[in-house]
Image: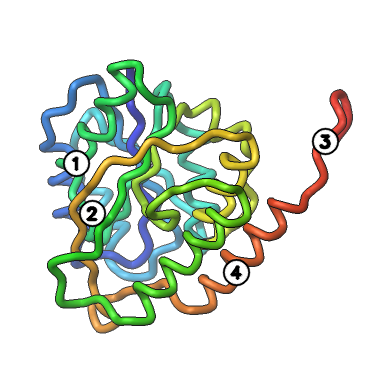
Amino acid sequence: MKLSILMPVYNEEERIADALKQALAVDYPCEIELVVVDDGSRDGTGEILGRADDTRLRVVTHPRNAGKGAAIRTAVDSAEGEYMVILDADLEYDPQDIPKLLAPVLDGRATVVYGNRTFGSHSAYSFWYVMGNKAVTTAANVLFNSYIGDLETCFKLMPVALYRSLDVRSRGFGMEAEVTGKLLRRRIRPYEVPISYRARNREEGKKITWKDGVEALLILGRERTRRRETPGRR
């Protein structure tokens, strides 16, 4: 199996070199490729990516910022692996956890795997950030009669073909809710494994806001009430 690690990047010149180094240093149990999409960065991110030298790395550039969902869509279109996982470039997630996500797939126990953050041992979280995440996750569980622990997690591992079939249209952070809503609507329940997580604060460049939480709730409601397509029609 080949795993495509998809990394959307926007103005991360202070972290991107370390993010690449950490992602490529992991001892993966399968072949991997790292597909980085520079989503219209206006700092030195592009220059740093241009100097990166690894046969497993491919860089795609957006001429202007289009949002995380759009960057992931570009990365998925370029992916050559059978499976994919999203890894942000902000160093909040540890790529050393990716083999743990792969284990249930390689063992035949799961097809879709989410990394579940526990929101423990921290110094950067705000009360409203954690409560907002829990509210969105709870809404998904109520709407779809499921029990997942972390909808907004970046670590979503699944077959590339499955992600493409979801036809995710959200261009920003709403893609997290759209992916999960569409999976749950198909009665695909993600298998969850615990992961480590170090949140950064606003001063360090945290981008998600309360508006993204409201958008996520609207997207979940839309996916729950959307009419099923009639076979052979769109």
> Identity of the amino acid at label 3?
Glu
Q: Which residue is mark 2?
A: 93
Q: CA distance from mark 3 to mark 4?
A: 24 Å
Asked if 119 appears above or below 105 in the picture, the reply is below
Q: Which mark is residue 215?
A: 4
First in residue order: circle 3 vs circle 4: 4
- 25 left or right, relative to 229: left
Q: Residue at x 58, y 48 (%)?
A: 145
First in residue order: circle 2 vs circle 4: 2
| Quadrant of res 207 | bottom left
First in residue order: circle 2 vs circle 3: 2
Q: CA distance from mark 1 to mark 2?
A: 8 Å
Which of these two is toward me, 172 or 60? 172
**Position of the N terminus by quadrant:** top left
> Identity of the amino acid at label 2?
Tyr
Q: CA distance from mark 1 to mark 4?
A: 29 Å
Which element type, helix, strand or loop, lies under badge 2?
loop
First in residue order: circle 1 vs circle 4: 1
Q: Which residue is mark 3?
A: 229
Which element type, helix, strand or loop, lies under badge 1?
helix
Image position, residue 41 (x, y; %)? 39, 64
Q: Residue at x 31, y 45 (%)?
A: 115
